[in-house]
Amino acid sequence: MKASLLAALAAGLPVLAFAAEPPPQGALTPERVFSSPSLSGPSARGVEVSPDGRWVTYLKAETTNQNKLDLWAAPVAGGQARLLVSGQTLEPPGQQLTEVEKNRRERQRVAALSGVIDYRWDEQGKRILIPAGGDLYTADAVSGQVVKLDAGGSGISDAKVSPLGRYASYVRDQNLYVIDFADGHERAITTAGQGPVSYGLAEFVAQEEMDRYTGYWWAPGDKAIAYARVDEGPVDILPRLEIGVEGSKITQQRYPKAGRPNVGIELYIQAPEAGAKPVKVDLGADPDIYLARVNWSADGRDLYVQRETRDQKTLDLLRIDPATGAAKTILTERQTPWINLNDDFYALKDGDFIWGSERTGANHLYLYHRDGTLVHAITHGDWPVTGAASGAGAHATGVAGVDEAKGLVYFLASKDTPVERQLYVVSYRTPGEPQAVTHGHGWWTATMPKSAKAFVGYYSDPLTPPQTALYAPDGRRLSWIEQNALDAGHPFFAYARRYPEPEFGVLKSEDGQDLHYILQKPAGFDPARKYPAIVQVYGGPGVQQVQRAWRPPNEKLLLEAGYVLFQLDNRGSANRDMKFEGAIANRLGSVEVDDQLVGLEHLRSLPFVQADRVGVMGWSYGGYMTLRLLTDPRTHFRAGASGAPPTDWREYDTHYTERYMGMPQTNAAAYDASAVVPRLGDLSGRLLLLQGMADDNVQFSNSIAVMAKLQGLGTPFDLMLYPGQRHHIDDDHRPLQLWRTYLQFFARELGGR
């Protein structure tokens, strides 16, 4: 249940209302929220510093279409940014993607985007590789001249440039290929991919739940490629009805439900030259494992593999000899109730490596020798090193970059409060107290190129839309990449003064832990009035809603409609320690509800809230939580909107569900207690149920079970189905319709302005 999507949906979920009275003059409308340019202003995505340090490149939406991305370039030394490659030239309207690429984009939550959505520099800084529309292109870094590569036909996925820039690599038709730039010839690394077997692709749960979107990894110096062989043969085939605008079809989806078989996975190493033979990696005697992460040492002498047990309580780090495939376990993490994966492994040039672990309860960094000997802890404290962010996923990297010449590691952390994040630096050789590199009461994200001479910093707070700049390692701003100032020319400027500043606060859970919340008051707030309120909930692991960051403009539609908007991060949510997150172990839908009830009681106690007119809304896990809250006799919600809800965790996938609930064969009582459908007889308030009719993540069958049960009980409810849509409703004008539906529903059930 990908946090990146869930956070985005939970933060902007469906709602649209035309209230009892007409909107005030100058009010923000749904039509404006879902038109271009974006109300958040221009944003830079995928920012990279070229390997030669001369250019900063980034993706930027077209002014007239915020979902069509172009590639831009600006001199690092300062100067005018320029359009390098237009997305329109690479991915024209109507171009069809393969199902593999559609699925990969859905897993990465970029399915709504088109144009240039990914690109890779070569190591010389002369050429940029751009996969687009299932084809492969190169662009000259100076002129922007685009050349289409002969990649043996369309349908490529996961394209990369080899470390030295000699090859382009990609997966097509379930096999791994390379193109030698010197002669332009394509060569198959594998040829046996067919049926349920693929090479170089990440399986469903790796992409959806493990934040691993690739199935192959280049060695330094272009020496070899490590690649996965995935056999989906053991995985159950679930016939999934996809109902679309042009008709319906049955998709035979291989979906590993909790307690059922996973894919068979193997790992091989092979040189890219013609005639090279694959070397099989020894992953151990137990075939029922997860291939969690794969990294090469800086010199290419060793391959490091993270192997996770099926119960997700043990993570082994294997050091592999590339010549023989022989493996040695050099580090083992064991933890209950589960182990969270991260991307904090960093191979150093001297052979040591940096490692992230939650062994003390919060994620921290450690220095290890090549053989797995612990040198020392680099960071410590009751705060986590974390890259997790709303829309970024629970397993993101906290390590932003490393300056090996000075022995410094730069990392992201919410050291002082979970609702803010800064970039810090500390010596990994002689650790001391980390020093903050960034400042301000907001939310930072940062990435640093290998040169460590600068970093790309992204910042926002509730009053500052997302800004991107290039910074010196000491935090000095060198140049703006996208200043995005909230001035008279900004798309949101005309609306900015309509909304009171969001208020942040802390409540206590029943076990005494801090529960952070954010409260937003309606436009034109009058403290003498009483307003209906909406609780916007996600509630599940891997997502943090409450951040001192720029809020999605679609939330403002609720404020325009006259609602108080309340969000609370209950136990189980991200960017805390294992005590906080692990409270949900083996009891999904319980402590989260208890904590949301604490927030609900606080909300109803406020003098400007009409206590008997409170609604709730959420998507995915938030849809599940909406149903749990509506069926809890303590809550008394007037109405709730539940989007794409998992209703029985037996029907969800292995890696996610078993992490939090164990195996259904041995933990049946917990699965029974967490199910939604048996509770629907206790539904309070009116329900609006929403679902994409081609959802391959939380499948349509979940909502069908809710419909059938309520109909059998004689309980009226509202329903909105989206033909052809998957887990994220993002096609054409459907998001606009989604918000109109929500606002009209809540206007009818709660009132409003």
Image (cartoon, rainbow, N blue to C red):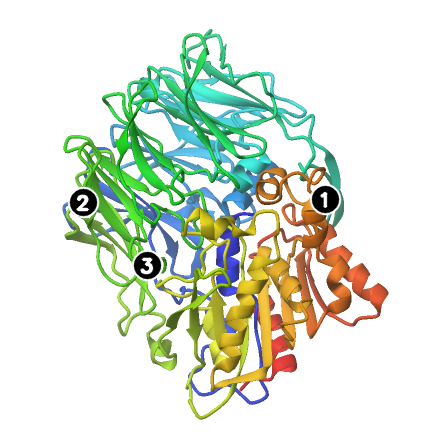
- Image spot of residue 592 (x, y percent): 56, 59
Q: If you read the primary sequence from the N terminus, does the residue marked by circle 2 or circle 1 appear first?
A: 2
In the rendered image, the residue lying farthest to the front is 511
- Verify CB contact (< 8 Å) between mark 3 and mark 2: no
Local crowd at mark 1 within 10 Å, few (<14), some, or many (≥20)?
A: few
Which amino acid type is shown beneath numbered disc 3? Thr
Residue carrying label 3: 417
- Image spot of residue 610 (x, y percent): 55, 85
Q: If you read the primary sequence from the N terminus, does the residue marked by circle 3 or circle 2 appear first?
A: 2
Which amino acid type is shown beneath numbered disc 2? Val
- Verify CB contact (< 8 Å) between mark 3 and mark 1: no
In whole angstroms, how far apart are the C-alphas of marks 3 and 2?
33 Å
Residue at position x 71%, y 47% in the image = 669
Residue carrying label 1: 668
Picture quadrant where residue 750 is located: bottom right
Q: If you read the primary sequence from the N terminus, does the residue marked by circle 3 or circle 1 appear first?
A: 3
In whole angstroms, how far apart are the C-alphas of marks 2 and 1?
58 Å
- Image spot of residue 221 (x, y percent): 31, 18
Local crowd at mark 2 within 10 Å, few (<14), some, or many (≥20)?
A: many
- Verify CB contact (< 8 Å) between mark 2 and mark 1: no
Above/below status of 173 relative to 107: above
Picture quadrant where residue 162 is located: top left
Residue at position x 26%, y 66% in the image = 485
Q: How many marks?
A: 3
Foreground tag (3 vs 1): 1
Secondary element at image label 3: loop
Residue carrying label 2: 76
* Residue 715 visible, this orientation: yes
Foreground tag (2 vs 1): 1
Local crowd at mark 3 within 10 Å, few (<14), some, or many (≥20)?
A: some
Which amino acid type is shown beneath numbered disc 1? Ala
Above/below status of 356 relative to 182: below
